[in-house]
Image: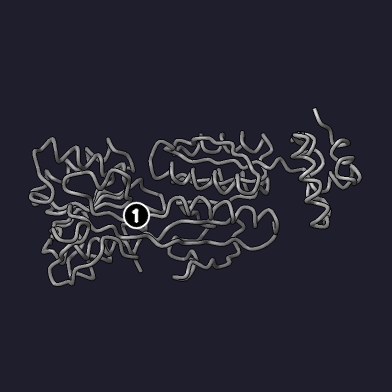
């Protein structure tokens, strides 16, 4: 097995120079660095990760704590995190907090005890213990998908970036990346209202999550934009899970005046809602129009095809890695919140007919025809 001494001799440099190339502990001229890398490749030299971590106090590993990894949305986020990490020579240690604040605190501590360089976390609805631990131990952390808020600050007060996606600094010492939630939800509700629906139900996510709060806010704004009153009986929580959403959908449909259209807050709840509709023998969109937050791979295969808000999940994951690496390089800077734009994927479950001459296009009353995908602004 080749050693560092062998690499140094082949490259014609000192072992100290080889160490600097491996550990980024001192600038090395590009030509010298290239000679060392070529020598390593020719000899099949494999760096000792443990020894490097002792020198640099870095393990070149990232802890990822994300619940519901089986959810296609979070699976794609994981793919984005993994790709970003590998691109920069980092490995991943993954844990599932199960959206439970106590378990969340435990798994984050376990990841930290394995000396990861930083964390990427999709926080639970009650992350106080998590925040306390991360702050106490000064763990470089990026929160993704769901935002957390400093003590005394409400979600509405949390700074976000402008429409260009450029992050804004805050005194908060954690970084965050998520998608737009309120405006896309408002757009779905407004569209259903334009189609003539006056009772639009919402299957909302787990209470306490920023995504749930923001999407309910968007739902209310959409109603207000359409001149429709807000009726709290038409909003029920599916707790971001399929089984709970199925029960919630049954409850909404059992109202004396049930909704004629339904919006679901994530892809798991969409499946639950569809199951409830099937059990009642109801057809979409003939009996009830349906729109959903979260697009997924097979949404285009349903009959009818599902109108959905698509989130840039892989990009969210990759951006989280970028923010974490920037945090590692500059630990003292203020935190940043980055919001990425969502995309409306307009299909037919909302009740709009497809143009037979233009597959994937839609015809909407009072609107010109449009392509299937359009940015939400």
Q: Residue at 23% across / 44% down in the picture?
A: 301
Q: 348 or 212: nearer the eye? A: 348
Give the residue pinned by disc 1: 310
Which residue: 48% across, 41% down? 66
Residue 221 at x, y percent in the picture: 28, 66
Quadrant in the rendering for residue 169: bottom right
Say which quadrant the N terminus sits in: top right
Quarter of the view holding residue 341: bottom left
Nearest the camera: 177 or 106? 177
The x and y percentages for residue 219 are 27, 60
Image height check: is 224 above or below 296? below
Q: Dot 1: what SS?
A: strand
Residue 34 in the image: above or below residue 162: above
The colour scheme applied to this rendered structure is one colour
Looking at this rendering, what residue extends furthest in the top direction?
A: 1
Query: Is 185 on the left-hand or right-hand side of 339?
Result: left
**What count of labels does the image hold?**
1
Q: Residue drawn at (38%, 41%), measured in percent from left and top? A: 72
Dot 1 crowding, Cα within 10 Å, few <14, some 14–19, many 20+: many
Quadrant of the snapshot with the C terminus:
bottom left
Q: Tell me residue 195's x, y (percent).
A: 13, 64
Q: Nearer the viewer, residue 143 or 191?
A: 191
């Amino acid at each position: 097995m080749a050693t560092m001494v062998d690499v140094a001799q082949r490259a014609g440099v000192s072992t100290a120079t080889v160490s600097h190339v491996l550990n980024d502990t001192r600038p090395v001229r590009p030509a010298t660095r290239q000679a060392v890398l070529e020598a390593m490749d020719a000899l099949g030299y494999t760096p000792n990760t443990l020894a490097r971590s002792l020198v640099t106090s870095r393990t070149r590993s990232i802890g990822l704590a994300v619940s519901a990894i089986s959810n296609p949305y979070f699976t794609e986020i994981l793919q984005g995190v993994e790709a970003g990490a590998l691109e920069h020579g980092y490995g991943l240690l993954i844990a599932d907090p199960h959206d439970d604040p106590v378990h969340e605190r435990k798994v984050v501590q376990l990841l930290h005890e394995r000396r990861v360089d930083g964390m990427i976390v999709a926080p639970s609805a009650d992350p106080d213990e998590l925040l306390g631990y991360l702050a106490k131990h000064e763990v470089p952390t990026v929160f993704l998908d769901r935002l957390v808020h400093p003590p005394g600050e409400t979600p509405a007060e949390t700074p976000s970036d402008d429409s260009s996606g450029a992050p804004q600094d805050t005194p908060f010492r954690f970084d965050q990346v998520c998608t737009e939630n309120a405006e896309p939800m408002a757009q779905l509700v407004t569209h259903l209202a334009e189609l003539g629906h006056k009772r639009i139900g919402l299957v909302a996510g787990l209470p306490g999550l920023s995504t749930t709060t923001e999407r309910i806010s968007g739902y209310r704004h959409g109603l207000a934009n359409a001149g429709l009153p807000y009726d709290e009986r038409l909003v029920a929580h599916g707790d971001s899970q399929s089984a709970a959403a199925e029960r919630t959908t049954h409850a909404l449909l059992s109202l004396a005046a049930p909704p004629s259209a339904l919006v679901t807050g994530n892809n798991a709840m969409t499946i639950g809602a569809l199951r409830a509709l099937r059990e009642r023998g109801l057809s979409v969109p003939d009996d009830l129009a349906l729109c959903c937050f979260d697009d997924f791979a097979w949404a285009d295969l349903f009959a009818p095809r599902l109108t959905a808000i698509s989130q840039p999940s892989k990009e969210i994951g990759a951006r989280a890695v970028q923010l974490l690496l920037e945090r590692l390089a500059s630990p003292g800077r203020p935190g940043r919140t980055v919001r990425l734009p969502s995309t409306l994927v307009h299909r037919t479950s909302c009740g709009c007919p497809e143009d037979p001459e233009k597959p994937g296009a839609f015809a909407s009353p009072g609107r010109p025809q449009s392509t299937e995908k359009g940015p939400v602004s």
